[in-house]
């Protein structure tokens, strides 16, 4: 990893007052060789040595040597920079010499002290510095009285699994790596890391949920960017009207928001696919569906119509894998497959080379590619998932989809019991099927619960639950009845446990 070394720019050492004394070789101005003796002694080019006093024999007149203006300017500039550096790195106790292990931290100050009225900072303690460098952990912890926020599908449920895998998914990136924009200039998606491409194909072959042979793999900043890239690629330029974008209700709430966000002249949101009239369209097919977990197929068919299949939840922890999907455009994401939402990596499997090139062009213009660091981390994560099933030495506890299936079955059982105890909520009926991956019958355990409030005096279920400190997303945002709400099933155990207990108490 790249190392930060204080003293790289100005060589020197820390003194007792916390300042830095520059090395003499940084203060010295090189002295070019004299062209002749007269130039060296009579006002020609001089180094800093020319500023030193000279001794003259007794009885001879002493001649003053005039210092050229440029030398004085250089000397003043060096002195000023040294003074500024000393002032910037000063600490409160000038008499105390910091121990060696604190020297590199001498210029780091506590934010509170730096912004206080005194205007003075103090060296940041090791413990505080360790906390300041620690990565974020997402939403804060909860207590029985907390507001429980299950509005977003933040997949922190998977943290417990990854904590137990040791270094299987860890990665160190040296400071000199991943610096270029380019990954593989021979690939249609020229910013796709070959290692990530390999692990995506390997995982799909292992699970059997999507065909990869004959497909181009494209990488995006989450599947949302790939969704936008697909709309761009499938919408003809110069058309008289924008391309209509539709999806069967209840549809993912972000589809209309993202489609119309930039008010593009290429495409526009046209609502529920079941009520759409026309032959030219882009149909978004989310299966298993967000928000209700149902298995979906396209409902429209025409020669000029196109379909984009969002398969973010087509993984064995959520649904039986009943077939190998082979649609023209298929979208996936590490957010819901492995739980690494913060890595912001999604991928698309695209059959047509021309469409793949247009989608790549969109991402190029949008973000000039996709973070290589994120791709390398995602590749290591996917490798750890596949290794858990393909390498005999890996323990069974390191099998992601087994963990996910157990957790989802447990949570759905808890939710159904809570809804029954309350008596005012209902859920979709449980379905099951034969999973080609696990080689056994498996029930559907979606990432979201499509919960309905059946109490007669409640017309807006989201508002009703909000009054009981439960934040969820209203069915109206999915093109459905507001008596429905979408509940994330993927939060941490403590938040989910409080949610089901609170839900069961509502009458």
Image: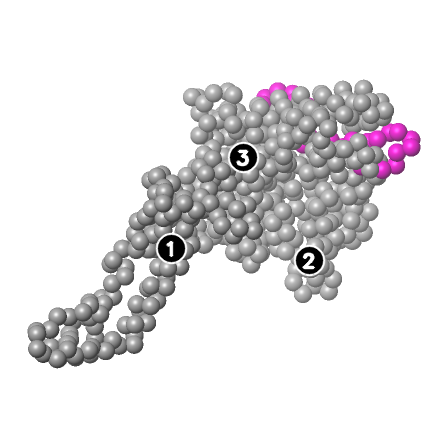
Q: Distance between the residues labelled 2 and 3?
A: 34 Å
Q: Mark 3 points at which residue?
A: 204
Mark 1–mark 2 Cα distance, whole angstroms, equals 50 Å
Residue positioned most to the front = 59
Image colouring: one colour
Out of 165 and 232, give the one closest to the viewer. 165
Find residue 262 and name its label.
2
Which numbered circle lies on residue 86? 1
* Residues rendered magenta in the picture: 436-462
For residue 504, which quarter of the picture?
top right
Q: Mark 2, residues whose alpha carbon is within 10 Å: few (<14), some, or many (≥20)?
A: few
Q: Which of marks 1 and 2 is in front?
A: 1
In the image, 252: left or right of 89? right
> Closer to the observer: label 1 or label 3?
1
| Mark 2, secondary structure of its residue | loop
Where does the C terminus fall, quadrant-wise?
A: top right
Say left or right for 437 vs 245.
left
Residue 474 horizontal/vertical position (percent): 78, 39
Residue 436 shows in this picture: no
The residue positioned 53% from the left and 50% from the top of the image is 118
Does the magenta-highlighted stretch encompass residue 442?
yes
Q: Quadrant of residue 415?
A: top right
Is 229 situated left or right of 504 in this image?
Answer: left
> Could you tell me how far apart the alpha carbons at marks 1 and 3 are, in whole angstroms?
58 Å
Q: Is residue 26 left or right of residue 138?
A: left
Which tag, 2 or 3, sits closer to the chain's start? 3
């Amino acid at each position: 990893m790249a190392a930060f070394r204080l003293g790289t720019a100005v060589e020197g050492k820390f003194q007792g007052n916390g300042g830095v004394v520059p090395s003499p070789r940084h203060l010295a101005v090189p002295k070019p060789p004299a062209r002749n003796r007269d130039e060296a002694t009579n006002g020609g080019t001089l180094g800093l040595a020319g500023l030193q006093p000279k001794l003259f024999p007794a009885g001879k007149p002493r001649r003053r040597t005039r210092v050229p203006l440029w030398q004085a300017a250089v000397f003043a500039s060096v002195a000023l920079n040294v003074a500024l550096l000393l002032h910037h790195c000063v600490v409160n106790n000038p008499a105390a010499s910091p121990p060696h292990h604190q020297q590199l931290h001498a210029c780091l100050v506590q934010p509170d002290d730096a912004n206080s009225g005194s205007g003075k900072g103090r060296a940041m303690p090791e413990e505080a510095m360790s906390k300041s460098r620690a990565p974020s952990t997402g939403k804060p912890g909860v207590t029985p009285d907390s507001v429980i926020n299950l509005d977003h599908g933040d997949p922190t449920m998977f943290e417990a699994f990854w904590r137990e895998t040791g270094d299987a998914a860890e990665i160190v990136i040296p400071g000199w790596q991943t610096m270029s924009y380019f990954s593989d200039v021979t690939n249609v998606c020229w910013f796709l890391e070959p290692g990530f491409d390999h692990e995506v194909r390997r995982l799909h072959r292992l699970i059997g949920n999507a065909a990869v042979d004959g497909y181009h793999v494209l990488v995006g900043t989450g599947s949302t960017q790939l969704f936008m890239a697909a709309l761009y690629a499938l919408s003809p330029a110069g058309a008289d009207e924008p391309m209509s974008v539709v999806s069967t209700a209840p549809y993912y709430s972000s589809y209309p928001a993202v489609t119309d966000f930039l008010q593009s002249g290429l495409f526009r949101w046209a609502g529920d696919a079941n009520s759409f009239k026309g032959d030219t369209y882009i149909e978004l097919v989310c299966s298993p569906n967000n928000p209700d977990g149902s298995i979906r197929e396209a409902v429209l068919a025409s020669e000029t119509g196109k379909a984009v299949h969002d398969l973010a939840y087509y993984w064995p922890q959520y649904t039986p894998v009943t077939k190998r999907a082979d649609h023209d455009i298929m979208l996936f994401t590490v957010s819901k497959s492995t739980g690494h939402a913060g890595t912001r990596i999604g991928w698309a499997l695209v059959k047509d080379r021309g469409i793949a090139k247009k989608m790549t062009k969109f991402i190029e213009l949008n973000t000039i590619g996709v973070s290589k660091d994120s791709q390398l981390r995602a590749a290591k994560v996917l490798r750890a998932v596949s290794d858990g099933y393909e390498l005999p030495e890996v323990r069974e506890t390191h099998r992601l989809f087994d963990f996910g299936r157990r957790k989802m079955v447990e949570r759905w059982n808890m939710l159904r019991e809570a809804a029954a105890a309350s008596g005012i909520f209902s859920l979709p009926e449980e379905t099951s099927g034969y999973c080609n991956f696990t080689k056994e019958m498996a029930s559907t355990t979606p990432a979201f619960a499509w919960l309905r409030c059946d109490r007669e005096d409640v017309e807006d279920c989201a508002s009703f639950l909000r009054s009981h400190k439960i934040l969820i997303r209203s069915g109206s945002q999915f093109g459905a009845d507001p008596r429905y709400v979408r509940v994330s099933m993927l939060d941490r155990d403590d938040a989910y446990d409080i949610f089901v207990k609170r839900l069961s108490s509502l009458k």
